[in-house]
Image (cartoon, grey):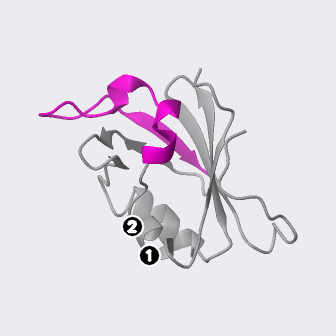
Amino acid sequence: MPPFKRVMLDITPQNVWTVERYLNVFDFAEIFPEDTFSPELGRGVPVTLHTDLGFDIVTDIDRSKMQLRNRSKSHGWMRWTGAKGLHAGDRIVIEPCGEREFNLSLENHEQRDGDTSVGTRE
């Protein structure tokens, strides 16, 4: 099991556009199994992110970009972020729930009223 219970990524005015399109994992790469990262040529071994919208994102990580590989707009990262409608003040939460499985959810800024913590690992 990865060493952290969960990763929280705060959405800011500066990163909302990028996060809507890509999840850069550079700051929390250690929660993923090493073989998830693509070799120089090819793809890594996929992990599954179980979304809070009831569908799964199955993906590896592009090592050269340190991003989840966006395999499909209809089943991938952009589907989830589009349906969620990210705003500055929201927080993405990624929680390991198995060796190659993670729960993905969003705490919106209204749910977090008064919480001033910044992108942390618990």
The residue positioned 67% from the left and 48% from the top of the image is 120
Q: Is residue 118 left or right of residue 41?
A: right
Report the quarter where the N terminus lies. Answer: top right
Residue 77: quadrant of the picture = bottom left
| Stretch of the chain drawn in magenta | 26-52
Asked if marks 1 and 2 touch (Cβ < 8 Å), the reply is yes
Mark 1 or 2, closer to the camera: 1
The image shows residue 50 at horizontal and vertical percentages of 56, 44
Residue 76: quadrant of the picture = bottom left
> From what the image shows, is residue 113 above or below residue 97?
below
> From what the image shows, is residue 110 above or below residue 65?
below
The residue positioned 81% from the left and 66% from the top of the image is 112
The image shows residue 24 at horizontal and vertical percentages of 41, 53
Name the amino acid type tagged 1.
Trp
Report the quarter where the C terminus lies. Answer: top right
Q: Tag 1: Cα neighbours inside 10 Å, few (<14), some, or many (≥20)? A: some
**Viewer-closest of 52 and 9:** 9
Q: Is residue 89 left or right of residue 104?
A: right
Residue 87 magenta-highlighted: no
The image shows residue 69 at horizontal and vertical percentages of 31, 49
Residue 32 magenta-highlighted: yes
The residue positioned 59% from the left and 68% from the top of the image is 11
Q: Is residue 115 left or right of residue 60?
A: right
Report the disc number at residue 26: none
Q: Tag 2: Cα neighbours inside 10 Å, few (<14), some, or many (≥20)? A: some
| Mark 1 vs mark 2, CA separation in Å | 7 Å
The image shows residue 104 at horizontal and vertical percentages of 60, 49
Q: Which residue is mark 1?
A: 17
Name the amino acid type tagged 2.
Arg
Q: Which residue is mark 2?
A: 21
